[in-house]
Image: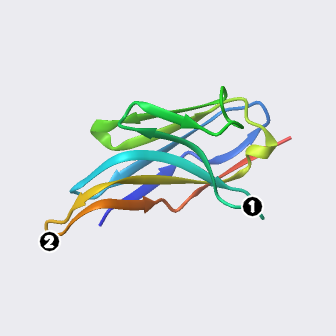
Amino acid sequence: QVQLVESGGGLVQAGGSLRLSCSASGSGFSPDTMGWYRQAPGKQRELVATIAGGVTTNYADSVKGRFTISIDNAKNTVYLQMNSLKPEDTAVYYCNARGSHYSDSTGIFDRNLEVWGQGTLVTVSS
């Protein structure tokens, strides 16, 4: 069973910073891409940032220059450093991981497993 555990959300004033962390637990999982998505009240979930192959990053235009995604491959942990936060960044932030998974118990190999975290709330006050 692969799980993503997120931490680091909270309440911050506009202009402040937060750092989100997401660790993938469970054996046999090799993520190719990890990233962050967010969902604000009444809105659809949207991409924030992803990192593929541990190197290639992609950011939503709204966060470019303010947010930085990074990864510790040895720990299967992805981080999102959020600076210069704005009230419109308020949302539930979800970690996402996609990659291959081999189950020792079933012997099943899944080439395209996708996993979501439970979400962490980020609130930016004006």
- Amino acid type, residue under disc 1 in the picture: Lys
Instruction: Single out the mark in the foreground, 2 or 1.
Output: 1
Pick the residue in front: 3 or 45. 45
* Quadrant of the rendering where the C terminus is positioned: top right
The residue at which mark 1 appears reads as 43
Residue 14 position in % (x across, y down): 79, 35
Quadrant of the image occupied by residue 58: top right
Element type at marker 1?
loop
- Which residue is painted at 40% across and 60% down in the image? 114
Q: So how many labels did they put on this image?
A: 2
Q: Where in the figure is residue 27, as x and y percent of width and height?
A: 22, 57
Per the image, the residue denoted by label 2 is 105
Looking at the image, which residue sits at the far front?
111
Q: Please tell me which residue is depicted at 37% across the width and 34% down the height of the picture.
A: 54
* Amino acid type at mark 2: Ser
Residue appearing at x 77%, y 30% in the figure: 15
Question: Could you tell me which secondary element the residue under label 2 belongs to?
Answer: loop
Query: Residue 85: where, in percent of width, then height?
Result: 73, 35
Query: In this picture, is 98 found above or below 18?
Result: below
Q: Is residue 103 left or right of residue 71?
A: left
Residue 71 quadrant: top left
